[in-house]
Image (cartoon, rainbow, N blue to C red):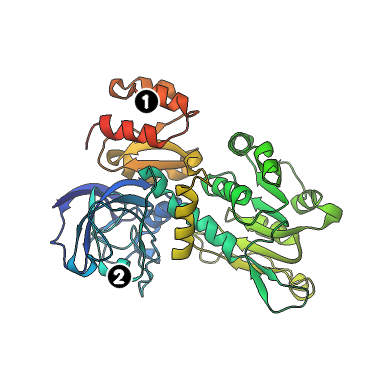
Amino acid sequence: MKTKAVRLWGEMDIRLDEFELPQMKEDELLAEVVTDSLCMSSFKAISQAEKHKKVPEDISEHPIILGHEFCGRILEVGEQWKDQYQPGDKFVIQPNIGHPKGYAPGYSFRFMGGDATNIIFSREVMENGSLLKYEGNSFFEGSLVEPLSCVVGAFNAQFHMKKMHSYEHVMGIKEGGTTALLGATGPMGFLAIDFAIHGPKKPSLLVVTGRTQSKIDMARRLYTEEEAKKNGVTLIYVNTREVEDVAEKLRSYTENDYGFDDVFIFAPNQDMVNYGAKMLAYDGCLNFFSGPADTQFNANVNFYDVHYNSTHFIGTSGGNTDDMKQSIELIEKKIVNAAKIATHILGLDQAAETTKILPELGGGKKIVYTHHKFPLTEVDNPEKISDDTCMKGLLPILEKHGYLWSSEAEQYFLEHAPEI
């Protein structure tokens, strides 16, 4: 079977290629990808190429398929897996498949990645339980399961002492406590706001920071203080651009300068880590969420606070399979509205160039429809869509859903957008 796929050949060298997939083996699966969500981690991969931890050294001869946030349907099932999977099953993928070299779909494999029409799942994916069934009513939300799982994993990885001086830890953010999301005005930060408001453990106070007022305004439109209050959370947005002492300013929002039980860092910024650490309350936990490209990235740690105030630091890189399962449930049951972060759509023909300029693009997640060709388009920009005659039927659907992408809009797109 032929496939079309965006492949990495070298540093910033990605191409849309058409090639033949090998014959599927009895311990493999053949699948159709419907959507992939573009991720900044892919930009890091194409920027570093062979220097990236997950990218093989021989990509100039054996290029890999990009994309690790994807959703689709199973087409054929190898004999070994016929009791677990059926043709027609919808799936999402947990990229951390337990490969001994840390290899992952979207970074490391010739025939397995999200920016493709058809792919082959190798046996280690199924053996590790990383190919998960998905029953949501849209494919694009399935592509957002993986990024949501990164947030879920970060919240689950937080820990606090069961009681003072106890060596027994309670996992997760402190329920009813104080939480700060620093630099959280991108799509991952938006998911974190949503999860903090609607997840199983909620803080009593949630402070969200950014340095660009338009992004803060967008966050406030999507996640209102009123909605947070309905769920028992006091939500405060703060623009820190002109704030001289951020730690002091943010601590002032906590009662009696208590500080924060949980602090999440959403940008690889040294100053942010430094003042984030100063914000921690007794037994406070700081999560360095955003992965730096600099292998020598470091920041100051106050070991007096580590010793006497029991502050602690962790970092999470993606979610695990249990986090993925929890995320599937959150999306399927509409507890978290992942559609709010899907701000752009595009066809596979635009995926390579769009990946190259991801750091320059505003908005949230960019959803690739792999079997179609379509320009990169903001879903809340009706003027741009109205220029495309075949897509004019999208306008009343978008208006109906408040110019958020939806399963109804997706279905119309899949039926009317030109095929690649």
Q: Is residue 209 visible?
A: yes
- Point out residue 114 in the picture as x, y percentages from the top left corner: 32, 52
Q: Is residue 129 found left or right of 24 in the rendered image?
A: right
Precedes in sequence: disc 1 or disc 2: 2
Q: Quadrant of residue 64?
A: bottom left
Which mark is on residue 167? none
Check disc 1: other Cα within 10 Å, few if <14, some if 14-19, many if 20+: many
Q: At 34% from the left edge and 37% from the top edge, which residue is drawn?
A: 346
In this view, the residue farthest toward the bottom is 167
- Tag 2: amino acid: Glu
Q: Which residue is mark 1?
A: 394
Q: Is residue 359 found left or right of 83 in the rendered image?
A: right
The residue nearer to you, when weighing 311 against 87, is 87
- Point out residue 279 in the picture as x, y percentages from the top left corner: 75, 58
Q: Quadrant of residue 30?
A: bottom left
- Point out residue 375 in the picture as x, y percentages from the top left corner: 33, 32
Q: Is residue 189 found left or right of 338 in the rendered image?
A: right
Q: Which residue is mark 2?
A: 124
SS of the residue under disc 1? helix
Check disc 2: other Cα within 10 Å, few if <14, some if 14-19, many if 20+: some
Q: Are marks 1 and 2 in contact (CB under 8 Å)?
A: no
Q: At 50% from the left edge and 51% from the top edge, which residue is drawn?
A: 330
Residue 391 position (above or below residue 253): above
Q: At 53% from the left edge and 47% from the top edge, which residue is drawn?
A: 335
